[in-house]
Amino acid sequence: MTSAHGISKGSLCRRRIRILENMETSVSRVAGAALLAGVCIALLIAKAE
């Protein structure tokens, strides 16, 4: 019983780590998209002026 319980705990920890890694990659993607949008807007404003 104890060995099976330990294995399940380990898999849960690994799943949490994977979820955190997925969140970090999605956040970085959103940040990158926001930066690109900011640069595009800045260029449009510069052209308008």
Image: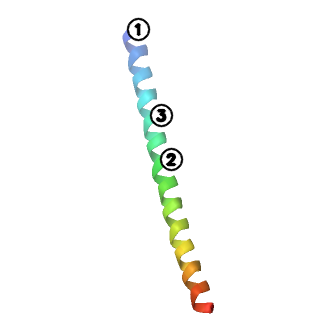
SS label for mark 1:
helix
Nearer the observer: mark 1 or 3; the answer is 3
Q: Which residue is mark 2?
A: 23
| Cα–Cα gap, marks 1 and 3 | 21 Å
| Cα–Cα gap, marks 2 and 1 | 32 Å
Residue 6 image offset from top left, x and y in percent: 40, 15
- In this rendering, the answer to whether 47 lies above or below 34 is below
The residue located at (50%, 47%) in the rendering is 23
Of the residues shown, which amino acid type is indicated by label 2? Answer: Met
Q: Which residue is mark 3?
A: 16
Of the residues shown, which amino acid type is indicated by label 3? Answer: Arg
SS label for mark 2:
helix
Of the two numbered discs 2 and 1 on the same chain, state the one appearing first in sequence.
1
> In which quadrant will I find the C terminus?
bottom right
> In which quadrant will I find the N terminus?
top left
Residue 34 image offset from top left, x and y in percent: 55, 66
The answer to whether the residue labelled 1 contacts the one labelled 3, judged by CB atoms less than 8 Å apart, is no
| Cα–Cα gap, marks 3 and 2 | 11 Å
Q: Residue furthest bottom?
A: 48
The residue located at (54%, 79%) in the rendering is 40
The residue located at (52%, 67%) in the rendering is 35
Q: Which mark is residue 2?
A: 1
Q: How many marks?
A: 3
Of the residues shown, which amino acid type is indicated by label 1? Answer: Thr
